[in-house]
Amino acid sequence: MNFDDMRARIATGEGFITALDQSGGSTPKALKGYGIEDGAWRSEDEMFGLIHQMRQRIIESPCFGNGKVIGAILFEKTMDGESGGKPVPARLAERGVVPLLKVDKGLEDEANGVQLMKPMPGLEALCERARALGVFGTKMRSVIKSANREGIEAIVAQQFEEGRRILSAGLVPMLEPEYDIHAADRAEGERILLESITRHLDTLGPDQQVMLKLSIPAEAGIYAPLIAHPKVLRVVALSGGYSTEEACEKLAQNPGMIASFSRGLLQDLRHQQSDDEFDGTLGRAIDQIHAASVT
């Protein structure tokens, strides 16, 4: 797939985007969920080696290339690794999966009910390297914890500011202002978020588009205007702590929004499973998430 093929795949593909982007802080938890306890590695390199083996197993599974997974978000070390004897982005593209890269450096402390992203020095250089490896776009996450209008506006403004840097580097940004699903005022805050995103979308240039990764909304269908907006390539949903079953049930109530799950895809995979058990478990998760995404 070339860049235009990838754009079309993201825009119209009947499937979902998976997240294989656990970074340093979340990797031990992901490995534990996979059945590998903390004492199984002696260094950070060994830890990342183990998580890369898990990701290779997923990427190379027969069901991963069956057309239902249209994109995959990668951690930088995964982007730089290999699978099937090829660089990971090239191997994904070969399997019909559009490669995307997580670029944020983590979260600032909470202020005004939100956690902004930490500064991203060297973002342009990282994007240039990613594009050379065949990556199509990026993803960056910040978090909203309450319906504070000032905080939500700050989060959206930062996402679009960094998104412009990414667009200038030739990649398509996925903006992820996650709304904490446990927030009591989420329905109110998501209406503020919708207003702010819509206003900022109208500031993009004539040929610029972004992707949006949002929590499955408390009010089903509220993001329909974003799904239809000409400046939005695709709207995807994060699972946000829901189980696969809960996330798929809620996602199916939001036509046009597709999944971008991490935990939802990985929750039943185990290091100890045979290849047949692993592939069967992964295949069932892919089928379930795909069905919710195309409902």
Image: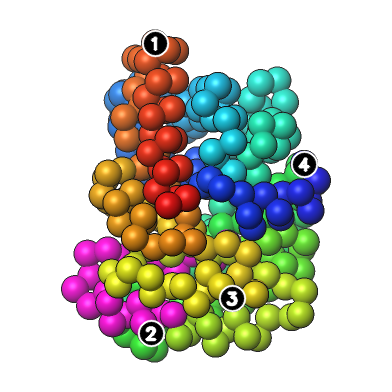
Residue 26: name its quadrant.
Answer: top left
Q: Which residues are magenta?
A: 174-194
Query: Is 65 covered by the magenta stretch?
Result: no
Mark 3 lies on residue: 229
- Mark 2 residue type: Ile
Location of the N terminus by quadrant is top right
Q: Nearer the viewer, residue 255 or 286?
A: 255
Q: Of callouts 3 and 2, which one flags the residue occurring earlier in the amino acid sequence?
A: 2
Front: mark 1 or 3? 3
Q: Gap between marks 2 and 1, in whole Å?
A: 47 Å
Q: Of callouts 4 and 1, which one flags the residue occurring earlier in the amino acid sequence?
A: 4
Query: Is 189 covered by the magenta stretch?
Result: yes
Q: Nearer the viewer, residue 179 or 67?
A: 67
Give me the disc on residue 192.
2
Please tell me how crowded label 3 is: few (under 14), some (14-19), or many (20+) other residues with Cα within 10 Å.
some
* Mark 1: secondary structure: loop
Q: Residue at x 45, y 86 (%)?
A: 195
- Mark 3 residue type: His
Horizontal and vertical percent for residue 162? 62, 71
Q: Of callouts 4 and 3, which one flags the residue occurring earlier in the amino acid sequence?
A: 4
**Marks 1 and 3 in Cβ contact (< 8 Å):** no
Mark 1 lies on residue: 274
Give me the disc on residue 1.
4
Horizontal and vertical percent for residue 78? 59, 36
Please tell me how crowded label 4 is: few (under 14), some (14-19), or many (20+) other residues with Cα within 10 Å.
some
- Mark 1 residue type: Ser
* Depicted 9 relative to depicted 161: above or below: above
* Mark 3: secondary structure: loop
Examine the rendering and report whether any part of residue 199 can be seen: yes
